Image: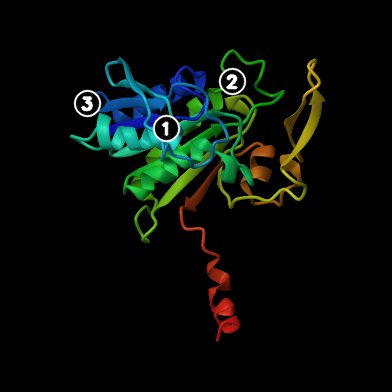
Amino acid sequence: MRILITNDDGISAPGLRALHAIASEIAGPDGEVWTVAPAFEQSAVSHCISYVRPMLIQKLDDRRFAVEGSPADCVLAGVHDVMKEAKPDLILSGVNRGHNVAEDVIYSGTLSAAREATIHGIRAISMSQAYGQGNLGLSDMFEAARRFAPDIIRRLLADAPWFDQPYPVFYNVNFPPIPADHVKGVKTAVQGHRPAATFGVEPQTAPNGRLFLWLQHGSGNESASPGTDAREIHEGYATVTPLRADATAHDLVNRLSEVFV
């Protein structure tokens, strides 16, 4: 199996090293793992692409490239340049430092890489490791992801639907912020909703008198409903959520057509 890995934390991120180990296990001794990742951190850039400017790409090592661009750019570079002679069988994005649940799905560069992969007809999985008091003190805060990701990926590859609709599905996987031995199991979950606004701003005046605004994260995952990605990782479960690039509110199409009769 040929696997392309990327992320939004940057080419030097420890989560990308964890993902390389996970991908190597999935690819097997006869497989290949290629890395095309942002040269610098690109967290929360969502699905932006370098549409009006070129992106510099540098080869750092065999099958390892850095791109001055977004995670979606990295997928484009990997599929259409680095691996153009033999496209990847699977694209993995992560392992992000921090969860990507509920409203985070909108902002996440990690998810955008997986979403971009599906646009090109390639199976993709995004993975994120939540962090908190339960795992920040560990020698490897990604140990839950390392422990559970290989089995989750294998199960998805073997039995999950991928290309059942024009916009293929990709899978968003989150691991709770606790040691691997404390993870209660794996649950399928829907994208959650946290009732309070996800982000706010904190003003700060610089020494030169100019005003800057720092973004601050809002409510916690415990405010989301049971059965959602946010709530279940809060309860100690790894979660798997199927997502698509299709943003249509299908439940409203028939009702809206009545408005324009």
Say if residue 202 shows up in the picture.
yes
Residue 151 in the image, given as x and y percentages of width and height: 43, 35
Label 2: element kind: loop
Q: Residues at badges 2 and 3 in contact (C-beta under 8 Å)?
A: no
Which residue occupies 27% across, 16% down? 62
Q: CA distance from mark 2 to mark 3?
A: 29 Å
Amino acid tagged 1: Pro
Amino acid tagged 2: Met
Amino acid tagged 3: Asp
The tag earlier along the polypeptide, 3 or 1, is: 3
Disc 1 target residue: 150
Q: Residues at badges 2 and 1 in contact (C-beta under 8 Å)?
A: no
Disc 3 target residue: 30
| Above-or-below relation of 113 to 141 | below
Residue 256 in the image, given as x and y percentages of width and height: 58, 77
Which residue occupies 39% across, 57% down? 167
The tag earlier along the polypeptide, 2 or 1, is: 2
Q: CA distance from mark 2 to mark 1?
A: 17 Å
- Disc number placed over residue 141 in the picture, else none: 2
